[in-house]
Structures are given as C-alpha cells and as structure tokens.
Image (cartoon, rainbow, N blue to C red):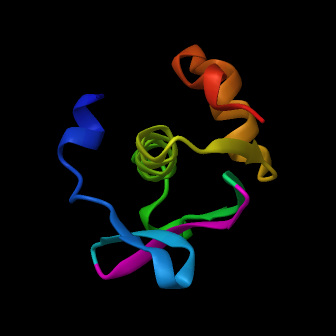
Amino acid sequence: MSASSAALPPVTHAPAESRFLLNVDGFDAVVEYESRDGVMTITHTRVPEAIGGRGIAAHLVRAALDHARAEGLKVVPACSYVAVFMQRHGEYAGLLE
C-alpha cells in the first residue's frame, strides 16, 4: 500500500449497485462492474477531476481486485485503466479471465 492510499478512507462495496465507492472531500469516486457466472467484468473507473492525482483510482481498483480474489472470481478488465493497472501489478495476473 502506498503512503497516499494509506491516508484514504476505506472503500465501500455496494453489491446491489455493482460498484465500489470512495468519498473523498465530498466527491464520489467509483469502480463499476458486472458479475456473472463467476466473472467480474470491471466496466468503468471514475474519479472526479477535483480529487484526481491522489492514487484514488488505484485504491478503488485494488479493493475491487482484492474482493474478486477473496470471492474466487475471475476478472475481465473492460475498463482501460484496470487493464493497465493489472499489467503493471503482476500480483493480480492470476485473476484474469
């Protein structure tokens, strides 16, 4: 965990909405996904510009990938940010569908 993500609040998982949420300084950042047949397809990562540059997207994506790992799910990184994140962080390679 980087020093910047250590200072961030915990990520909230909202399974009924198929998203992971993080509120920072009154702004909501989100990772959205679809889950089906043991596969989590991460479709979108959104961090408002006002809170960008603080490692928030990485913090959210780690939470989503750690959840997938804990639940035994495979991951399809349909979001370009997640695809690059997974390439850069080999510890998540085993999750790829």
Residue 6: image x %, image y %?
20, 40
Tell which residue pokes out farthest to the front in this image: 37
Residue 1: image x %, image y %?
29, 28
Q: Up-down: is 17 above or below 2?
A: below
Q: Check if residue 71 falls in the magenta segment.
A: no
Would you say 97 lies left or right of 15 here? right
What residue is rendered at 54% in x and 83% in y?
A: 17
Label total for image: 0
Q: Quadrant of residue 49?
A: bottom right
What residue is rendered at 45% in x and 41% in y?
A: 62
Q: Quadrant of residue 93?
A: top right
What residue is rendered at 57% in x and 25% in y?
A: 92
Would you say 10 lies left or right of 51 here? left
* Secondary structure mostly seen in the magenta stretch: strand
Q: Which residues are magenta?
A: 26-37
Would you say 54 lies left or right of 84 here? left
Q: Up-down: is 74 above or below 42?
A: above
Q: Up-down: is 60 above or below 70?
A: below
Residue 50: image x %, image y %?
46, 70
Residue 10: image x %, image y %?
23, 58
Closer to us: 58 or 97: 97
Which quarter of the image is occupied by the C terminus?
A: top right
